[in-house]
Amino acid sequence: MKYTTKTLAAASAALLSCESTVAFSSNNLSSPRSRSIIGNGINNSGNIQQPQQQQTSTTLYLGDFFNFGKKEEQETTTPTPEEEAAQTGYVDDEDPIEKIFGIFFGKKEAEPMGMKRFGAERFPEQYPAVLDEWADPVEGDDKEMALLRPLLKNTNLETRNLRLTYDANRDGFDPVTFHSKVDKQGGAIVFCTTRAGIQCGGYNPKGWVGYGEARGSIAAFLYILGGKYAAAGAPAIKLRKVGGPGLAQMDLPESGPSFSPDALVIPLGKDGRVARSKLGSYYERLPDGTNSLFGKDSNVQLRDLKVYHGVYAEGEYIPFTDAEPFALY
């Protein structure tokens, strides 16, 4: 339909009036209202263009009805117990009983009253010896220390430098000399070689003080280096303490090292180089049921006997250097 000149003039005047009242900024031009005003123009043929209406559609799903009005949740990560303890000072690795107590007494603190909690990392010798893990080498170990180092995994000597405190061939096969060298030096590892070439010994976590007492420790163990009993790739076989921690070491001033009354006994003195072994009562037997560290022999002659202790700095605390008549571990 064609419009008259008068009609066209009126339409143009209305458009100019709209343009004078609307400030066309970059934001206005992008707004729906601005696009509507601009769209109400006149085409080249003189016809007035009708505004185009945008058609929009929204698709709703079942889940949208349940999430209506809720803000989109941000992705969160659950902190580990260690991270939570570092952030809050509390730990969240409690068992059901601890959770019940927590309702009444509050969450378990990571360090109550500034004291660190008991655990295998801080107190490894409160647990039985590990059988399938081996300590890493330590700088400064000589050839013989390097043989013994893997056995010290999860002990107080695992990363501590070692020193030879007693060598029977050097110091004598004598109990008095033995105790003068080893007493009050802390935990130690005993290493002996039989005349048949068997290399064996034991780890004494509590050391010796020479007071004639039985020193208990669940972390004590016996061992045989190499041989048929060592698993593939393992440097040795270790035999754990059994029957609880008691009688792990018989600390008798008239005798040399004695792992329980019978598991590995080296009397020294009048017995000279004799060593005896009977397994099963206080320390594990060998996998095939053999009840002696020396195989079919219960008594052997030793070629050498040595004891290694940890190196402590001057003034540094050395554990287990006194009697412990009421020890329960």
Image (cartoon, rainbow, N blue to C red):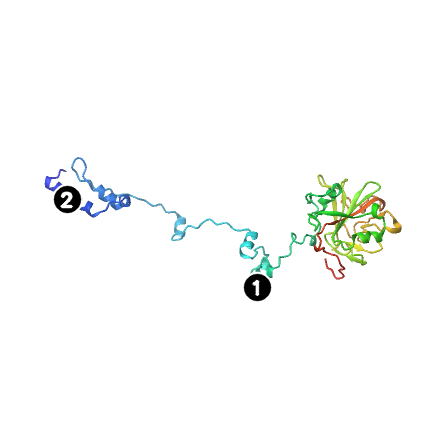
| Observer able to see residue 164 | yes
Residue at image coords 73%, 47%: 162
Q: In the rendered view of the protein, which quadrant contains the N terminus? A: top left
Residue found farthest to the right: 270
Residue behind mark 1: 105
Instruction: Give percent across and percent down for residue 268.
Output: 85, 50
Query: How far apart are labels 2 and 1 at the CA level?
Result: 82 Å
Q: What residue is disc 2 on?
A: 13
Q: Work out whether residue 37 or residue 60 is closer to the camera in this orientation and state it.
A: 37
Q: Nearer the viewer, residue 302 or 11?
A: 302
Instruction: State the residue at coordinates (13%, 43%).
Output: 10
Q: Which amino acid lies under the numbered mark 2 shown in the image of this protein?
A: Ala
Residue 231 location (% of width, % of height): 72, 41
Left or right: 83, with 38 as reference point: right
Q: Secondary structure at mark 1?
A: helix
Crowdedness near tag 2: few (<14), some (14–19) or many (≥20) residues, C-alpha within 10 Å: few
Q: Can see residue 284?
A: no
Give the image quarter of residue 96.
bottom right
Left or right: 54 as drawn, with respect to 138:
left
Residue, far front: 314
Q: Report the label total.
A: 2
Q: Of circles 2 and 1, which is in front?
A: 2
Query: 30 or 97: which is nearer to us?
Result: 30
Rendered residue at 79%/43% (across/down): 199
